[in-house]
Amino acid sequence: MGDILEKTSRQTPTVQVTEAMLEEDLLESPQYEGQFDPHVWFDATLWRMTVDPVVEQLSQLDPESASYFEQRGEEYKRQIDELNFFVQEEISAIPEEQRALVTAHDAFNYFGRQYGMEVRGLQGISTEAEAGSRDVQELADFLAERKIKAIFVESSVPRRNIEAIEAVQAAARDRGWDLEIGGQLYSDAGGDEGTEAETYTGMFRENVETITEALR
């Protein structure tokens, strides 16, 4: 993907929106040596840093509208600040022992670090990875032992990974723990046009509402 974007940048203005982020703020990918976990949007304080590079590039392309872009950028940063406060308030309402987020793949590590939730994924960062039987059993052990109320499916993962989540649910039931599928989360894609989740802040709020409703 990086190669594709680099080639594109020779013909079309292309912005690395994460350029203002410090490497020490990024999480290393356990699956891909020397690479960072790309899911930075699940920490609203990090995603706030993507606004200024966009404002700067738009202002270069259309200098006459620079003040407008700057104004809209500041308004958007305020929206992200409000979102961050909302997420903190909602997560704090989940009982501490239930603050474990288990999904099909590892998209939520930044979310867990920022908002104080233990995060487990049935597969790695890539949605193309497949979970094995051992992964299913280990995750079921964790969920049953901790008596976590719910696990979650994701909108952007293949059907086979949803089936693996259902296998975890069945394995937890074999251990005497009735585990619910708490709902669908957006991870690598937003919602359909016309829905609340088509925007970044709307997608994030909907995720958090789904998580808190299931785990509270």
Image: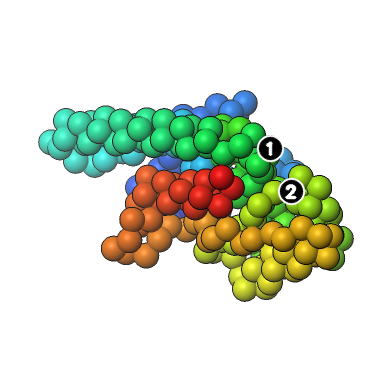
Local packing at callout 1 (Cα closer than 10 Å; few below 14, some 14-19, many 20+) is few
Q: Quadrant of the C terminus?
A: top right
Tell whether 104 sits left or right of 45.
Answer: right
Q: Quadrant of residue 173?
A: bottom right
- Residue 123 lies, with reference to residue 18, above or below; the image says below
Disc 2/disc 1 C-alpha distance (Å): 9 Å
Residue at the extreme right of the image, as rendered: 134
Q: Nearer the viewer, residue 25 or 96?
A: 96
Q: Mark 1 points at which residue?
A: 97
Q: Do the residues labelled 2 and 1 touch (CB within 8 Å)?
A: yes
Q: In which quarter of the image is residue 201?
A: top left
Q: Quadrant of residue 139?
A: bottom right
Q: Nearer the viewer, residue 180 or 36?
A: 180
Residue 2 appears in the picture as rendered: no
Residue 165 appears in the picture as rendered: yes
Q: Mark 2 points at which residue?
A: 147
Q: SS at mark 1?
A: helix
Tell me what residue is drawn at x 31 percent, y 36 percent: 79
Q: SS at mark 2?
A: loop
Q: Position of residue 93 (x, y in %)?
A: 52, 36
